Image (cartoon, rainbow, N blue to C red):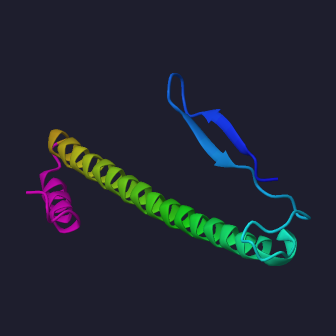
Amino acid sequence: MSELLLGKVADGAAPYRTMAKPGRNDPCPCGSGNKYKRRCLPKEEAAEHARFARAAAEAVKAASALKQQQQAAFDALQDEHDLAEASNAVIALVRAGKLDEAEQAARDLLVRFPEVR
């Protein structure tokens, strides 16, 4: 039941000692005299369930944050692409001699991308 086990932490590391987990029908290690399954097992299972629930909630939160970061990065790339495409269209209009259209396209560009000057 509660014999000590020796193990190694990592290559060349000092050994550590752990208590073997009691079986369901073993006496409870708390000293109550009851069986482990009737006394401490439900508490340990509830604590383990709570740890798993917290870990799952943290994983969902981390995944949501990652998704937001990825969406922000995608949006920034899309904006850069749109700016480059619109700028190139203005240049093409200038080269084609369509200066009135190029001026209007440039003004539209400034409205769409006010942070770029």
Please indicate whether residue 32 sits to the left or right of residue 95 in the image. Answer: right
Please indicate whether residue 92 sits to the left or right of residue 14 in the image. Answer: left
Which sits in the foreground, 108 or 61? 61
Which sits in the foreground, 62 or 111? 62
The residue shown at (86%, 58%) is: 23
Please indicate whether residue 80 sits to the left or right of residue 99 in the image. Answer: right
- Segment tinted magenta in the rendering: 97-117
The residue shown at (54%, 29%) is: 10
Which sits in the foreground, 82 or 55? 55
Q: Is residue 86 magenta?
A: no
Q: Is residue 109 magenta?
A: yes
The residue shown at (12%, 51%) is: 99
Tell me which secondary structure the magenta stretch mostly adopts: helix
Quadrant in which residue 94 is drawn: top left
* Extreme residue in the top direction: 12
* Extreme residue in the right direction: 25
Q: Is residue 12 above or below residue 16?
A: above
Q: Is residue 69 above or below residue 95?
A: below
* Extreme residue in the left direction: 117
Where's the C terminus, which quadrant?
Answer: bottom left
Q: Position of residue 107 (x, y in %)?
A: 14, 63
The residue shown at (74%, 50%) is: 20
